[in-house]
Image (cartoon, helix red, strand yellow):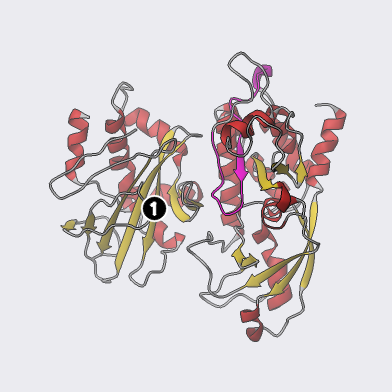
């Protein structure tokens, strides 16, 4: 990997968002601490991984009573913690003034909308199953299955502790090509507002070996939004950045994937993206 | 993957979603024992259309009586995973008060025959995931061992698809309380 490209991995890793966490109105009565909590949060992490800090601030580290569970909300929309923080931000609030104002709740967990997340083990299981699925797509699972259990732990610890080197020492192997061949498929998900994300098979090259770029993939998976004319009405964001559609998806997968090894692409109408 | 077949008690299986094959059924369990090793089924002749979906199909409701007298409603969906290229079983289980069973309760209900595996490596067997079509929380029976399992159960890969689904469901379903009505076994004969 070229030195410039390696720098990109580091830039992506360092992406952070200032978030202001405050108690939801209906929670205020029950808590003695009402001061909001300001945190600089990695775009790549899961919002429930900062639960300890939140509980320390609002509940002085006390355990929540039976039946209560921490959950997050923005604009009356419960935040799906299993999407990376940066994806939630781009999808729901892109380009609104910072900090991002997120409400926190302890009561009335919306279990018909959110996955329960009572411990970090839940996050770890979700993260590892994403990495595994991604490797099935890229290398038929051969790389992840040949790793030791401690390598799996190191990936998770790297993310959890925000340690770039710890993570990338192992992740490098997951992002390598086997015998110089491009990946079998590109692990990617496309998010749009108020819709279920799209996850379909996406090849990095044509049957004759020509590289496919982001534009090709968007046209195939979202033909109504990205037709043959200039893509004036919609744009695709990865890590909050509009990526040129002529970028090969193989390169995107190797450099702009999240730690879960998926490319998370947020598609927004241009007027919403640029208020 | 597509088959639809009426049966004596109105049980049918169907999967017709362009691009995303999908199949659903429901059952209601009253348990006589906490441990679901001796599951007895008596079917209720009850039909309840789900508002959810043109693509979703009500199947049958099975009843299983236990001591605690809590009626647990089960909802099962089978969705094809393009990544793993195998069918994946999603399910939800609700107490009679409408509250979702916790992941621990789901793990506890795994029959003793399979208990060892779940205790050893529970986080890679059943977890809660976002349903790939509806975007709602569902429990998922992880697909990563399905291919190996099916190679053992169905060594002849030229078997028909319907045979595959029924064989697979009757192999993994009992882990999570799903027992296919006998009528589906006919699909293995002429599928």
Check residue A181 for magenta coloring. Answer: yes
Task: Pick the residue in front: A115 or B170.
Answer: A115
Q: Where residue B108 appears, x then y in whole percent?
A: 39, 59
Please state, as top left, top right, bottom left or bottom right, where the N terminus of chain A lies in the image: top right
Answer with the quarter of the image where residue A150 lies. Answer: top right
Q: Main secondary structure of the magenta part?
A: loop
Q: Is residue A112 above or below residue A1?
A: below
What residue is drawn where x is 64% and y is 36%? A226
Q: Is residue A269 above or below residue A119?
A: above
Kindly identify the residue that appears in the image at 72 percent across and 42 percent down: A238
Residue lying furthest left = B8
The residue that mark 1 highlights is B91
Give the residue displayed 27% in from the left and 31% down from the top: B163
A189 part of magenta stretch? yes
Q: Nearer the viewer, residue A37 or A165?
A: A37
Which one is in front, A143 or B143? B143
Outermost top residue: A208
**Horizontal side, residue A118 vs residue A52: left or right:** left
- In the rendered view, tell whether residue A251 sits above or below residue B48: above
Q: Quadrant of the C terminus of chain A?
A: bottom right
Q: What's drawn in magenta, residue-wise?
A: A178-200
As helix, strand or loop, the secondary structure at mark 1 comes to: strand
Q: Residue at x 77, y 59 (%)?
A: A96
Circle 1 packing at 10 Å, graded few (<14), some (14-19), many (20+), is many
Percent coordinates x, y for residue B111 in the rendering: 32, 53
């Amino acid at each position: 990997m070229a030195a410039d490209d390696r720098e990109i991995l580091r830039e992506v890793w360092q992406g952070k968002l200032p978030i202001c966490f405050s108690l939801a109105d209906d929670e205020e009565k029950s808590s003695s601490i009402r001061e909001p909590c300001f945190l600089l949060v990695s775009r790549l992490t899961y919002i429930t991984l900062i639960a300890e800090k939140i509980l320390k601030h609002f509940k002085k580290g006390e355990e929540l009573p039976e039946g209560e569970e921490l959950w997050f909300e923005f604009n009356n929309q419960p935040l799906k913690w299993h999407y990376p923080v940066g994806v939630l931000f781009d999808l729901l609030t892109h380009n609104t003034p910072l900090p991002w104002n997120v409400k926190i709740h302890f009561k009335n967990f919306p279990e018909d909308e959110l996955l329960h997340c009572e411990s970090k083990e839940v996050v770890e299981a979700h993260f590892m199953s994403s990495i595994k699925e991604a490797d099935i797509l890229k290398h038929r699972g051969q790389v992840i299955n040949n790793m030791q259990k401690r390598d799996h732990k190191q990936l998770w610890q790297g993310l959890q502790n925000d340690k770039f080197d710890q993570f990338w020492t192992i992740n490098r192997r997951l992002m390598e090509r086997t015998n110089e061949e491009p990946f079998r498929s590109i692990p990617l998900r496309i998010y749009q507002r108020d819709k279920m994300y799209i996850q379909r098979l996406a090849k990095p090259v044509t049957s004759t070996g020509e590289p496919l770029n982001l534009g090709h993939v968007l046209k195939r998976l979202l033909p109504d939004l990205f037709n043959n004319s200039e893509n004036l009405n919609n744009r695709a964001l990865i890590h909050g950045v509009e990526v040129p559609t002529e970028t090969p998806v193989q390169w995107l997968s190797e450099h702009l994937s999240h730690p879960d090894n998926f490319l998370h692409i947020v598609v927004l109408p241009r007027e919403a993206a640029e208020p | 993957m597509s088959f639809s077949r009426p049966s004596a008690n109105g049980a049918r299986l169907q999967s017709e979603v362009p691009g995303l094959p999908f199949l659903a059924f429901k059952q209601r369990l009253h348990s006589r024992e906490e441990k679901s090793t001796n599951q007895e089924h008596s079917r209720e002749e009850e039909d309840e259309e789900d508002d959810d979906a043109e693509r979703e199909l009500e199947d049958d409701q099975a009843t299983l009586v236990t001591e605690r007298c809590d009626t647990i409603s089960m909802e099962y969906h089978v969705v094809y995973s393009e990544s793993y290229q195998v069918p994946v079983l999603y399910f939800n289980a609700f107490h009679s008060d409408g509250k979702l069973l916790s992941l621990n309760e789901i793990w506890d209900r795994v029959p003793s025959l399979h208990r060892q595996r779940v205790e050893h490596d529970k986080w890679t067997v059943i977890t809660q995931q976002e349903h790939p079509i509806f975007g709602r929380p569902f429990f998922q029976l992880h697909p990563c061992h399905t291919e190996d399992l099916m190679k053992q159960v169905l060594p002849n890969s030229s078997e028909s698809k319907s045979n595959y689904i029924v064989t697979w469901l009757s192999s993994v379903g009992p882990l999570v309380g799903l027992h296919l009505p006998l009528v589906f076994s006919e699909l293995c004969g002429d599928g």
